Amino acid sequence: MPAYMWKSFFEDEDRPEKPRRFGVTEMRGPNYSLMNQNVIQDILESMGQFVDGLKFSEGSHSLMAKNAIKKITELAHSHDVYVSTGDWAEHILRKGPTAFEEYVHECKNLGFDTVELNAGSLRISEEHLWRFIRLIKKAGLKAKPNFGVRFEASDIPVAGDRAYGAYILPVSRKLDLVEDVDLLIRRAERCLEAGADMIMIDADGVSKYADSLRADLVAKIVGRLGLEKTMFEASTPETSEWFIKRYGPKVNLFVDHSQVMKLECLRGGKSIRASELSLLRSSIKFILSIKHPHRIYSDDIVTISLI
C-alpha cells in the first residue's frame, strides 16, 4: 500500500526502500544561495523519503564552518540521506602531494559519504585518477567521478587510447573542446573497474536543456555503462521528465532541490497539476507547522520543495 495516494507505481516498478541502488534522486544542497540548515531540515522532514543524496555543489562546503557542515551531514543521515561533495578536489591538489589524502580524511570526519571527482577539471592522468578513487575507497567512502562529453583536443589520444604505463611525448594544451562520447565511456568504464561506485554525467553538451537534449549520447552511455552505475544531471523539470519517460523510474538523476516532489511524481507515473500542487503545498505547510509551531511558512518557502 503506497504511503501517498497520488503515487501510482506498477507492481513491478515500485520504489524500493532506501538505500536504493537505482532510481536515486540526488538533490543539490547549499550552493551560492542562502540555503540554511532550517530550509534543508524542512525539505527533508516533508519529503526526505524521496531524497537519496544531498550534494554540496561547486565546493560550497569550503566556505562553511566545520560545525555547520557537520550539523547538515548529521541531519541528512537522520533521514537516511547520503552526503556528497561537489567537484572541489582540483583546488586541493595545489597544496602538495599529500593534500588529496588529507582532504579525503577531512571529508570523512565531517560526515561526507561520497567524494566527487571532476575528471575534466582535475587535469591529471588516468593513472592518478584511479589512484584517487582507490584512496577514497580505502577511507571507507564512495567515489563518484564526474565526466563531461567534451574534452580538450590535446587530451584526446591521436591513435586511440594508449596502453597502461606507455610513454607519450608531452603536447601543448589546446583550449578547443571536442565532443567524444566514446572516450567518455572508455574512461568511465576504467574508473568503475578501479572501484568507482557511480559515474556522474555533466549536463553541459548532453542534458542541460530539454529542447536540445542529446538522446543519441544518452542512449550510448546507458547502453555501455548501464542505468545502475550512471547518474545524469537534469538541469530543468522538463529534462527530468524526458529521462523518466524514456528510461523509466529507475534512472538516477541529480536535480535542484526545487524539483524533488515533481520528480517523485514522475517516477510514480503521474504529473502534478496546478490543483494537486496547491493541495500538496497546503499539506506540507500543515505538517511543518505542527512540528515547528513557532515558525511561519510562506508559500514561497514551501514551494522550494514542490515546483
Image (tube, rainbow, N blue to C red):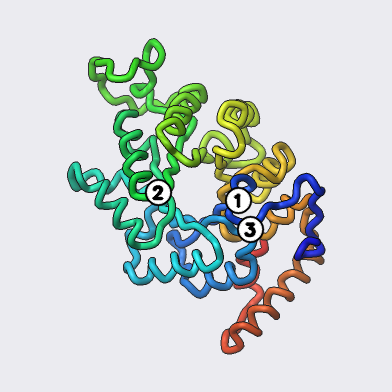
Q: Is residue 153 above or below residue 149?
A: above
Q: Are marks 1 and 2 in contact (CB under 8 Å)?
A: no
Q: Amino acid at mark 1?
A: Arg
Residue 220: numbered disc: none
Q: Are marks 3 and 1 in contact (CB under 8 Å)?
A: no
Which residue was labeled with disc 3?
260
Chain-order first, disc 3 or disc 1: 1
Chain-order first, disc 1 or disc 2: 1
Mark 1 secondary-structure assignment: loop
Q: How many C-alpha atoms fall within 10 Å of the one at disc 2: few (<14), some, or many (≥20)? A: many
Left/right of residue 26 with respect to residue 248 in the rendered view? left
Q: CA distance from mark 3 to mark 1?
A: 16 Å
Q: Residue at x 55, y 42 (%)?
A: 231
Q: Residue at x 37, y 54 (%)?
A: 59
Mark 2 secondary-structure assignment: strand
Q: Amino acid at mark 3?
A: Val
Which residue was labeled with disc 2?
115
Depth check: give the residue in front, 225 or 219: 225
Quadrant containing the C terminus in the rendered view: bottom right
Quadrant containing the N terminus in the rendered view: bottom right
Left/right of residue 242 with respect to residue 56 in the rendered view? right
Query: Foreground mark, 3 or 1?
Result: 1
Residue 7, by quadrant, is: bottom right
Which residue was labeled with disc 1?
20
Residue 295 appears at what percent x and percent y?
57, 85
Q: CA distance from mark 2 to mark 3?
A: 22 Å
Mark 3 secondary-structure assignment: helix
